[in-house]
Image: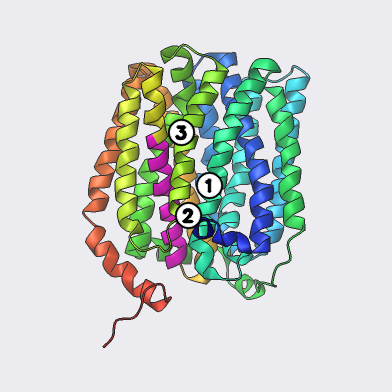
Amino acid sequence: MNIKTVFRALRHKNYRLFLVGQGISLIGTWMQQIAVAWLAYRLTHSAVLLGVVGFSSQIPAFLIAPFAGVIADRYSRHRLLLITQFLALCQATLLYVLYATHTIQVWHIIGLSFLLGAINAFDIPVRQSFTVEMLNDREDLSNAIALNSSMVNAARLVGPSIGGILIAIFGEGACFLLNAVSYMAVLISLSMMKLARQEYLSRKKESAIRQLKEGFSYAINFMPIRTILMLLSVMSMVAGGVQALMPVFAKDVFHGGSRLLGILMAASGLGALAGAIYLANRRNVLGLSKVIAWTAAVFGLGVMMFSQTVVLVLALPILLFSGFGMMVQMASSNIILQMLVEEDKRGRVMSFYTMAFMGLSPFGSLFSGILASKIGAGLTLLLGGLVCVAAVVVYTSQLKTLRKYIRPVYIEKGIIERPIQ
């Protein structure tokens, strides 16, 4: 592994600030996420309501993200991020106050999860499209995306582990409070950035609805973007089911508590972190369309194997490999989309990416919770893994056509050399 290659995007000061601030904040986010899931299951002992909580936290991405993409193409992405991060701080604070005053109920959890989901529906496409503005050299964009994924999954590895311990010692409220405090780090880092002035005024002359239709038409009619988003949508729904049912496996299958839930999520996070480092070590984007195929298959097969495993020592390495597959497939999709997209449509395309990655996940959470109450969590995830593998077969059959569309764009942008006539 070449260290200089892996961390080359860190030579940009604004990106370094972003990575540090966001990294601290995301640890708090994952701590809160595991605490919310555990609290909901502790209060209700219901897989269905657990699915409802997951659904409420992510359904706003499906409903709101397309409009967020239009806003990201019309207004300062830097200012928008300051607003979304401050609102997320307020959400975490309110959650802690309700817990500390012993007034929290399940409907509070569902409502506040929906609120945070609405905030994230704006934050994620804005943040994804803002990445390019933090770099002085766009050749480092793929590395920056991979490092961002590394940061997310390092936090995913550390956050649940700390969260599980804090829940066992102090209760879920400690996670809510520390998450609120952690948002200060990203607000400070964003405030310290010095950015080149971006021109957004010309984009405001057009109707927002017209821009939304234009972005949708562009994404659906450009075969590579459409194909990548469709596979990502399937993966996201299955991953949503896995995440929603993880407390059930921790408590009912492996007979553990909140600490074991943290360990299970950390195993998946460790695999995802390894996947992000693997991508960061790549020198260019060539061959990523094939990488998407085999890593999606790894995830699907991993979910199938985990669903039928009752021995913890076998489940942990399976989660590691499935986490690797999911992260590499997701981040590779992000990289290709950002390399292909036209600059004036970046926010909108990344909003569709957010819809596929997060917006459809709640449907997976809800459906999996309902199905698990009928046929059991194990069989539910087995069916989900089978769906993933089937989707990979369809995607793989289109790889040759996919490359025909991608190659001219890469040549035009100088990613690969123009053939000699």
Residue 283 in the figure: left or right of residue 387: right
Tell us which disc is closer to us: 3 or 2.
2
Q: Earlier in the sequence, mark 2 or mark 1?
A: 1
- Per the image, label 3 sits on a secondary structure element best described as helix
Residue 184 in the figure: left or right of residue 145: right
182 up-or-down from 35: above or below: below
- Identified by mark 1, the residue type is Ser
360 up-or-down from 107: above or below: below
Question: What residue span does the magenta drawing correspond to?
Answer: 321-340
| Residue 336 is one of the magenta-drawn residues | yes
Name the residue nearer the viewer: 33 or 299: 299
Our reading of the magenta stretch's main secondary structure is helix
Q: Position of residue 112 (x, y in %)?
A: 65, 32
- Per the image, label 1 sits on a secondary structure element best described as helix
Residue annotated with mark 3: 268
294 up-or-down from 163: above or below: below
Image marks 2 and 1: residues in contact by CB distance under 8 Å: yes
State which quadrant residue 26 falls in: top right
Q: Position of residue 317 (x, y in %)?
A: 39, 29
